[in-house]
Structure formats: C-alpha cells, structure tokens
Image (spheres, rainbow, N blue to C red):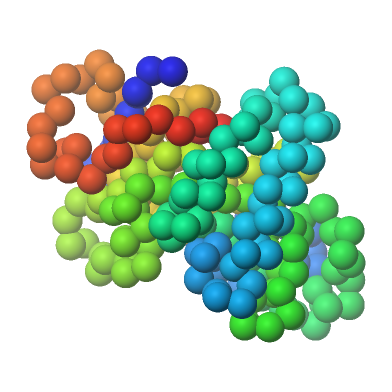
C-alpha cells in the first residue's frame, strides 16, 4: 500500500452536523476515547473486536472486511489512547425504545456517564490524540493530527457518523485514504504524494509514517 497523505484545505472548517440517526436516538452526541474509563474500557475494546469479526464473517471481501487481521493495530491504538468513537446520551425516548438489538448501538454502558456507543471508530496519531484530549482554541492557527483509520459498521453507514467523528477529532491530515472521494468531501484535497514541495518539517512534523489498514 502506498503511503499517500491528504491534507485538509487551510480554509476548510469541519462542521459538527447531526447524523441522521433514528428518532429515538435523540440525545447529544459526544466524542468517546475508548480507553478513558478504567472500569469499562476493556469491554468497549472487545466490543470493537466483535464488530470487526462480525463484519468479516458477513462479507470478508467488502471494503474493511479484512480489517479483522489488523487487531494488533487496534489494540496498540487503544493502549496508547489513540482510539476514538462516538456515543449518544440517554433520553426519555431512547430509554423507552432502544433495545439491545438496536442496529445503531454497538454496546451500552450503564455507568460512568456513557450510555449508547455507536458502531464506529477512528485511529489517530499521537498528535491527533493529544488534540482530542486538549482541543485547541478556535482560530489559533493550523491544526495538527493525522487520521490513520476510520471504520463504520456497514449497517450504520451513509448517515453522517463518519463525518461527525472526523469533525470532532479535527485532524489536519489523513493517511492512506482508500476512498479519496469521501475525504475530498470532508475537505482533504491536498495530495502530498504528488506535491513534493509540501514535504517540509513543519507540515509533516506530526504525521506518523507507519502503515495501517485504513478502511475509508
């Protein structure tokens, strides 16, 4: 796999759009760091592995189906606090209608403030993780961070979850984009694999060059 990198346009500002979720999932959407809770973080990690295994068993030749073979990368990202997702807060409507078989819910945590975890995750580099934990003030200059992998369960695609997670993380670059048209819609249009003059220390300082199985 080539080591292609796309940079976000300098004047592009990601928007925290509301995904088109079912009516009963009407709570606020939040960024989730999968290794942020010492009591439930391991359970969340294994829920991700179950999701990946299910995707592979259902359609191993689909985009992302082979990602089950990169469990090491997911574990490494989880251990290094570089693995992120989305969760939805509880409401009266969701408590009444959301069942354990809800296709838009990966797993549920009854304690610690997190309720409904969505079937999506993203791996970022160290700079991206630092930025997610300490979001910079607006209009303070160029953002840092590189997205190394984005995965959305097939049953939850095309509703805006990927776009929302990308906006929440607010990273400046994406590594090895498998579906460039998707990333161009997200504002990542500057191709470093072609524009060699952009390959300077200030631009690539926070981009990790090792390769991962990027799904989107």
Residue 8 % position (x, y): 31, 39
Residue 56 % position (x, y): 74, 32
Image-based side of 181 in relation to 21, left or right: left
The residue under the point 37% across, 58% down is 129
The residue under the point 74% across, 80% down is 110
User: Which of the image's four quarters has the N terminus?
Assistant: top left
Determine if residue 167 is in view. Answer: no
Q: Report how many numbered discs are placed on residues in the image.
A: 0
Determine if residue 161 is in view. Answer: yes
Residue 126 % position (x, y): 32, 53
The residue under the point 40% across, 30% down is 211
Q: Which of 173 and 186 is in front in this view?
A: 173
Q: In which quarter of the image is residue 104?
A: bottom right
User: Which of the image's four quarters has the C terminus?
Assistant: top right
Q: Nearer the viewer, residue 60 or 32?
A: 60
Q: In which quarter of the image is residue 94?
A: bottom right
Residue 54 % position (x, y): 79, 40
Q: Which of 193 and 67 is in front in this view?
A: 67
In the displayed structure, 181 sits above or below 87; it is above
In the displayed structure, 44 sits above or below 209; it is below
In the displayed structure, 103 sits above or below 5; it is below
In the displayed structure, 143 sits above or below 73; it is below
Image-based side of 138 in relation to 149, left or right: left
Q: Which of 148 and 197 is in front in this view?
A: 148
Q: Quadrant of residue 89?
A: bottom right
The residue under the point 65% across, 35% down is 68
């Amino acid at each position: 796999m080539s080591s292609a990198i796309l940079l976000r346009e300098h004047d592009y500002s990601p928007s925290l759009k509301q995904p088109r979720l079912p009516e009963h999932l009407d709570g606020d959407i939040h960024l989730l760091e999968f290794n942020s809770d010492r009591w439930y973080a391991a359970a969340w990690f294994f829920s991700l592995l179950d999701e990946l295994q299910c995707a592979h068993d259902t359609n191993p030749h689909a985009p992302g189906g082979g990602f089950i073979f990169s469990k090491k990368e997911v574990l490494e990202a989880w251990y290094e606090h570089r693995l992120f997702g989305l969760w939805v807060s509880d409401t009266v409507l969701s408590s009444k209608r959301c069942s354990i078989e809800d296709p838009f819910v990966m797993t549920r945590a009854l304690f610690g403030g997190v309720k409904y975890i969505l079937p999506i995750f993203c791996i970022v580099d160290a700079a991206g993780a630092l930025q997610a934990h300490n979001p910079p003030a607006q209009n303070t200059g160029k953002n840092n961070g590189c997205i190394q992998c984005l995965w959305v369960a097939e049953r939850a695609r095309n509703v805006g979850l990927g776009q929302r997670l990308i906006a929440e993380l607010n990273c400046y670059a994406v590594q090895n984009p498998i579906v460039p048209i998707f990333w161009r819609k997200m504002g990542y249009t500057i191709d470093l694999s072609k524009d060699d003059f952009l390959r300077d220390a200030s631009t690539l300082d926070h981009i990790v060059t090792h390769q991962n199985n990027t799904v989107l």
